[in-house]
Amino acid sequence: EVQPVESGGGLVQAGESLRLSCASSRFVGDDYAIGWFRQAPGKEREEVVCIDNSNGKTYYADSVKGRFTISSDNAKNTVYLQMNSLKPEDTAVYYCVADVLIATSICVGLDSWGTGTLVTVSS
């Protein structure tokens, strides 16, 4: 299976927006659950946003609620992460995971990780 491919990272100033894209052959119909994770320098990897299209479950980390939104375009086999009002603490490598499990207050990446895209937010 081909791993998902992320794009859209870059350098922005605090308060600006950025949209990340994740393309995968898994994003067909409604039977998929995907997530975005991130790892900041010197920190552990954390889940950011996840969605299970088969049942409508979503997960948003408290730190991004109200600022980040996940969406999809099945015609393009692509999932997006819209990031608004970016903060320096959002600086990290962002990973798309094409198979996740959403449980109460948590999202776990199961399989099919992308190689990541770097987002840098300057103050």
Image: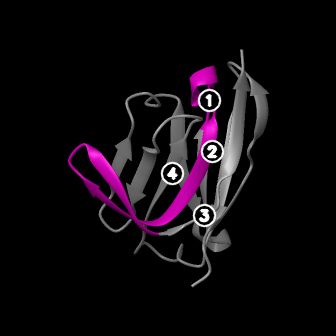
Tell me which corner region of the image, top left, top right, bottom left or bottom right, holds residue 13: top right
Q: Quadrant of the C terminus?
A: top right
Q: Nearer the viewer, mark 1 or mark 4?
A: 4
Q: Which residues are magenta?
A: 83-111
Q: Nearer the viewer, mark 1 or mark 2?
A: 2
Earlier-in-chain disc, 4 versus 2? 4
Residue lying at the far front in this picture: please name it: 42
Q: Are marks 4 and 2 in contact (CB under 8 Å)?
A: no
- Amino acid type at circle 4 is Trp
As helix, strand or loop, the secondary structure at mark 2 comes to: strand
Q: Which residue is mark 3?
A: 114
Residue lying at the far bottom in this picture: please name it: 1
Picture coordinates of residue 119 (x, y %)?
Answer: 69, 38
Q: Which residue is mark 4?
A: 36
Q: Nearer the viewer, mark 1 or mark 3?
A: 3
Q: CA distance from mark 1 to mark 3?
A: 22 Å
Picture coordinates of residue 33 (x, y %)?
Answer: 41, 65
As helix, strand or loop, the secondary structure at mark 4 comes to: strand
Q: CA distance from mark 1 to mark 2?
A: 17 Å
Of 7 and 80, nearer the camera is 7
Q: Residues within 10 Å of mark 2 (few under 14, many from 20)?
A: some
Q: CA distance from mark 4 to mark 2?
A: 10 Å
